[in-house]
Every structure is written in C-alpha cells, then in structure tokens.
Amino acid sequence: MPVAGAREHRMKCVFNEACSDSQYGNLSIQLDAAKRLYCHVCQTSSNILGLIHGLENHQPPAGGRLRGQEFKEAVAKLREINGVVDGLRPARTQRPTVTKQEEPMALPKEANVPMIRHENEAARNLADLHNDLVVDVAEMSPEAAQYVRKREWLTSELMQKWGVGWIPGNGRSLFRKNYLVYTHHNERGEVVSYSGRDLSFEAKWSKWLRDGKPEGKKPNKHRYVTGYKRGLELYGGYADRLNEPHVQESLNEYGVAVCEGQNEILRMESLGVAAVGLGSNKATDQQIEKLIRFAKQAGGNRALLLPDCDAEGEAGFKELLWRLTEAGVQTRLGFTSNTHDGMMRGRQPEDLTEEEWATIRQSLAK
C-alpha cells in the first residue's frame, strides 16, 4: 500500500511481466486526483482505468488507449469496485435511463513542467542545481572520481557543458553523494528534471540477482525528480544545439542519431556525433513523433540508430527501426551485436574507442 502522504507509489508493472526483469524501474502512480501512471520499462502511460485494465488482462490497452469494449469493461469494473461503498448507502429508486454510448475520456496533452515553475517549492529550488555540480575529479567522492576516470572521454569541459557532475551533500539535493547527476532539458532548453546515476548500481543489481530477485527490492540505475515523465523528452533534444557547427555537420552526415542513455549521448558527442537519447531501450509514441519531426526538419529525413547491443537494447531498437521506416524516415543501424565481426556484442555506444568508431563510420559511408 502507498505510504500515507506520499505523492507517488511504485509497484510491479501490471502490463508486461518482462518489465520485472529490467534494470529500468517499474510502474509509478501519481497519487493525485488524476491518478496518472507510467511504466519506466514498457513505457505504458495511462490512468486509473488503464490500471484496472492491466490488473485484469496483464497487458496494455490495444493501440495505447482504452477504446470500445476495453473501455466499457474497465468502467464496469470501476463501478463494481465503487459499488462496495455504494452498497452501504440507503437504497434509492432508480429511474429508467437512456443508455449512452461510452466514449473514451479525453486526456490532456502531457508535458513536463519546467522546474522553475514547478508547483512544488522543493522542486523549484532545484531548478539551478546544475550550478552546484562538481566536474573536477579531484573534488569528487572516490566512487564518483573512479566512475569518471574510467571514461576518459568524460572531460570536465564536456560535463560542464551538459550539466553533469557530482553533487556534495549541500542540504538541497535530492541525490546522495553516491550519484552522478545529469541535467535534463525540454525542447526549449528549460530544465525539467535531474537524474542521478547510482554509482553502486552494478553491485546492487548482482546482489539482487543472487538473492533470487526479491519483490520490492529491485535496485534502480537512475533516480529522477518525482513526477518527471522521461518518455516525453529526448535527452539532448533541445533547439539551441542546432546553433553549434558540429551539430549541423553531424546532421548532414548521419541525420538524427539516436542512442539509449545519457552516457551514450555524451560519448557520441565527444566523437563528433550529435545524438539524442531515449532514456530507455524502448521509444514512446511521443519520442517517436519527435524523432520523425527532427529527422524531417533538420536531418534530411534520415536517422541513425546506435543501440545498446544486449537483448533488451536491440529488441527496443528493432521496433524503433520499424516505426521510423513506416513513417518514411530513411533509417539505418550503425551496428548490432552481429555486425563488424561482433565488435559491439554485449557493449554500448559509450564503450566505443575512437578507432572502433572510425571503422563503423567508414562502413556507413559506403
């Protein structure tokens, strides 16, 4: 049950059993009047009726939204649940009513509120947290310094530019000292969230697997500001980047490059490739709409996919390849676990060396 006074509740995804094995988190439910819910793995977004549908059918609504018979069944179940309470009320004479065709509820267009205008004062106070981030490894915790030093391309200049760094315990941070913090912007360049990468995640994940995947104990790789919907944004997808010369050069050569996580975007940036990130292995409908628009407006109607070469990463990007191609975007895969003599098998774009990228780049030019 949710903790009293909590703003958000997390639970096992009711739409897809495979979500429980993922490293990306589980279903979050906003405990406000709207009861919005979002799965950070399968990217299903819905409301209380969608939750009822998922609990009953263990799958998301067909087409992404409740319609027709699915909608009627969810409404009927909600009425049945409410009837437990209604049954305590005095019986009333029911007038005959004309049966109306149930219509799907119109959902407001979702958007992440810039933190400077957030309804929560604590969130507003974090709007300029990026100014406090430490980018000098000499001033970081040993864990953070080790994490950064393992990635020689993650320079202090790159971190400063992208709003990435370690945050000391300064009394106003939602992240503990064992996180590397990333700044997230919307298309207009406004700060809409921060995420913290747990520097102890790998050890926690291994322990969780050894312990038999206990319910409610699965560790999360990233922590976000409460209420942030990462499926509405693309990391690095803000308009001001178009003013940078190397971004235009990259768009001319590759079209819109797409990766999964923040580190992948930063590594490709250091290699001269302007990419945007999904924040997950599976793109949402909103992200796909943006990618199509970016490709057609700025990328010569072309896209280059650079997946994480594990089972989850490649499965998600296969679907993205299909969706972009259906939309008429000329889409290519930069690599897979089986191309380039298996060079990328089990690896991610952040693992690329300059020599390896030169080989891949040459193959793309053919």
Image: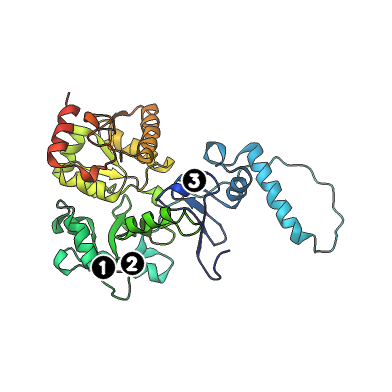
Q: Which amino acid does label 2 sit on?
A: Phe
Q: Tell me the mark number nearer the camera, choosing from 3 and 2.
A: 2
Which quarter of the rendered picture does the N terminus lie within? Answer: bottom right
Q: Mark 3 points at which residue?
A: 44
Instruction: Single out the residue that lies furthest toward the right.
Output: 93
Q: How crowded is mark 2: few (under 14 residues within 10 Å), some or many (20 or more)?
A: many
| Left or right of 81 on screen, residue 318 | left
Residues under labels 3 and 1: Cα distance? 32 Å
From the image, tell me which residue sits under label 2: 175
Determine which quarter of the picture holds residue 334.
top left
**Does the rendering let one see residue 202?**
yes
Q: Can residue 192 be seen here?
A: no
Residue 167: which disc? 1
Quarter holding the C terminus is top left
Taking 66 as reference, is 350 left or right? Answer: left
Left or right relative to 143: residue 172: right
